[in-house]
Image (tube, coloured by chain):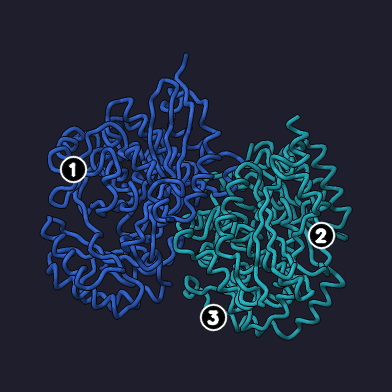
Chain colours: A cyan, B blue
Amino acid sequence: MAELIIAVETADVRFPTSLDLDGSDAMNPEPDYSGAYVTVRTSSGAAGYGLAFTVGRGNEVEVAAVRSLARLVVGLPVEEVLGDLGAFSRRLTGDSQLRWLGPEKGAIHMAAAAIVNAVWDLYGRREGKPVWRLLAGLSPEQLVDLVDFRYLQDALTREEALDILRRAEPGRAQRAEQLLSEGFPAYTTTPGWLGYSDEKLVRLSQAAVAEGFTQIKLKVGADPDDDVRRMRLAREAVGPGIRIAVDANQAWGVPQAIDWMRRLAPYDPYWIEEPTSPDDILGHAAVRRAVAPIKVATGEHTHNQVMFKQLLQAGALDVLQMDASRTAGVTENVAILLLAAKFGVPVCPHAGGLGLCEMVQHLAMFDYVAVSGSMDNRVIEYVDHLHEHFTDPVRIRRGRYLAPTAPGLSAELHAQSAAAHRFPEGAVWKRKAA
Amino acid sequence: MAELIIAVETADVRFPTSLDLDGSDAMNPEPDYSGAYVTVRTSSGAAGYGLAFTVGRGNEVEVAAVRSLARLVVGLPVEEVLGDLGAFSRRLTGDSQLRWLGPEKGAIHMAAAAIVNAVWDLYGRREGKPVWRLLAGLSPEQLVDLVDFRYLQDALTREEALDILRRAEPGRAQRAEQLLSEGFPAYTTTPGWLGYSDEKLVRLSQAAVAEGFTQIKLKVGADPDDDVRRMRLAREAVGPGIRIAVDANQAWGVPQAIDWMRRLAPYDPYWIEEPTSPDDILGHAAVRRAVAPIKVATGEHTHNQVMFKQLLQAGALDVLQMDASRTAGVTENVAILLLAAKFGVPVCPHAGGLGLCEMVQHLAMFDYVAVSGSMDNRVIEYVDHLHEHFTDPVRIRRGRYLAPTAPGLSAELHAQSAAAHRFPEGAVWKRKAA
């Protein structure tokens, strides 16, 4: 009897992070970090865990979208799914009726991400490998089979993708060993939330440097005078040798972004992240031309590989910030890593939120071992929130992510955390309501 | 006591259109035309009706998204809402938590459209005017106040938008009268669904010409040999003087689109619609350069004004096909009409589905009276489905939309139709299940 997927369970879990203004930025003043948390179960008792991250209200829509997609998954043979994860993704994103809600964007695409990630977690557990090692053990042909080239051919062909992967084959084992011994560089956003006082900003910036980080990030975009002051304070606090990225979280139009960055330029910002609408490819390109040598970074809201393709084609970014659950999970992110490698743009994944650090570390490490083969100018975002709720939390030492060694994608919540934070019926939310 | 919005009701209504292969195309083989149907009710007993169109499965996610947005609306004073509909849209699309599901795209943005459209319907009823006349009676300043210029400034400033509207002020009354006497040109997609036989294609094409249409549309993109044959048959059936548009519904990558259109070119296709991914601005531009003088048309899946801005900036389209409920309803469509006017691109709205003809006629007619002031190369799509379920259905005479005269946006369903088609509990669906 073949092993079948017998359930795709989903839960609305929310953490009341808005109470401390952790995570506050120009567009997200009061996020409650949340997730549509997915458990895929098989007829032999195995399980895989994934999630789509949201910031509170609306998580119930994400849960509804997962439920709608779940009907396409329950009953499938596990071997068939894991044997062709490219086809599995197309099944989720290509349903002729459900795709109307996207196509390949927004709530329905993020729901696909949660399920795809849970299935990769299942796959890793089955193989006894963390997902970065599972991916890095696949052949170039197997990896390329994950990619849907329909809309990519004008920028990346199957043959070019194979070439990229074959060039990186020598040295895979050595780079994996290096990750296990040295980890992967991180940067920290912990000091720079908009809601923090100047004193807290300075203290946390200095603490980050003392902890070994060589890059920090400040949120900007609410008030230009405040931003100049905060940028100056941060620069004075960390000195000239530390990179300070700034992040506007989409607050500006194109001309405003250019003006604002001219005011911050004297304090040597390393990159400006999300200077304008995440959909504005041509706008990002215009900002990049105007603010160079300050780099332009974007990607956490870039909704699919077609958008990333164009950002690269248009010369709109210096730093590609993939997200674990905005595009359709691990599978689509393999395609995006290949696109970035084709254009020679470093990938520095977006993280923070709920479980994003846990998931994206696998993508960055796979990229290093088997795609780009490089750590130059590559850093994974790190935010020190909510890791204690995961069974295999990220481990940071001296400003670096240690390579995960447990099987899977590291997105499993402790059962008691998931239960206590279920919205609205979990103990944490009942206590808040009372 | 001020009049308040006291309810935003939503219903999952679906029509089993897949039974007849009406609406079948390269990406939507079996649509069940559906809608998240919204009724906004006020404390004085008034109501407005709107909907977000979907093609079946997933309509439940749209309904969930409307419910999530409804919390932002219930309790607002009606005067305040109608007095600043620009702010009302920003309230729906800018909620700091809900916007994570977009921003401004996919299920959450379409839900905003349904609510915004219902509120415009309410406004029209209150003023005793069809929405096209309501809009065409607003001053240039009032119209420009509807627009969110944050991400548009690099392509269209407030002053430029005012200039466009002021230039069109003379002659408003005359053009409105002309619409009432002559209507607005339509084209028909009825002959060209992929699921129809050659015989039915020829018969319906000839019937369309006999009814007075000067443009028809064929679905293409499943099989090139079939498409060449169908295009040849249609051209032979209608003769050289009738425009035949073709619609690939996103089926192709960029090089494939170019090759396929070279094969159809001998039969003089007027435009190629959605040749590739709706997100691929640069891809559309490449196709347009390669297939000229065949025109490129797109827009029914273009998810917001920032995407339309770039399609125009990149020279990616000849025909802009706005949709009534893909972007955030009437309000955002005013901005898109202004962008199109700035770039001199004609707007030919997408219609068909459920209630789209009913809603978009108001947009095209407003455009003619108060924005572009032109009917040149402008046609509204027409599909002869499901109109009988609306209280104020479109009226087509000799290939033209007659101007609606009843107050509102024409999206109200007959109560018995809405009840019978509720999914899954309505009589139509219960009968199908039995």
Amino acid on which the number 3 mark rests in the picture? Arg
Q: Nearer the viewer, residue A207 or A142?
A: A142
Of pointers 3 and 2, the one earlier in the residue sequence:
3
Q: Quadrant of the C terminus of chain A?
A: top right
Q: Badge 2 is on which residue?
A: A394
The image shows residue A392 at horizontal and vertical percentages of 82, 61
Q: Is residue B412 visible?
A: no
Q: Badge 3 is on which residue?
A: A158
Q: Provide the secondary structure element on which disc 2 rests.
A: loop
Q: Is residue B229 above or below residue A206?
A: below
Q: Which quadrant would residue B95 be assigned to in this image?
A: top right
Q: Residue at x 70, y 84 (%)?
A: A169
Q: State the residue lying farthest toward the top.
A: B1
Q: Is residue A41 above or below residue A226?
A: below
- Check whether the beta carbons of the residues at disc 3 and disc 2 lie within 8 A of each other: no
Q: CA distance from mark 1 to mark 2?
A: 64 Å
* Left or right: residue B415 compared with residue B201: right
The image shows residue B219 at horizontal and vertical percentages of 30, 67
Chain ID for label 3?
A
Q: Quadrant of the N terminus of chain A?
A: bottom right
For the residues tagged 1 and 3, is the chain the same? Answer: no
Q: Residue at x 61, y 51 (%)?
A: A63
Amino acid on which the number 1 mark rests in the picture? Leu
Looking at the rendered structure, which numbered label has been put on residue B402? 1
* Left or right: residue B206 compared with residue A272: left
Q: Provide the secondary structure element on which disc 3 rests.
A: helix
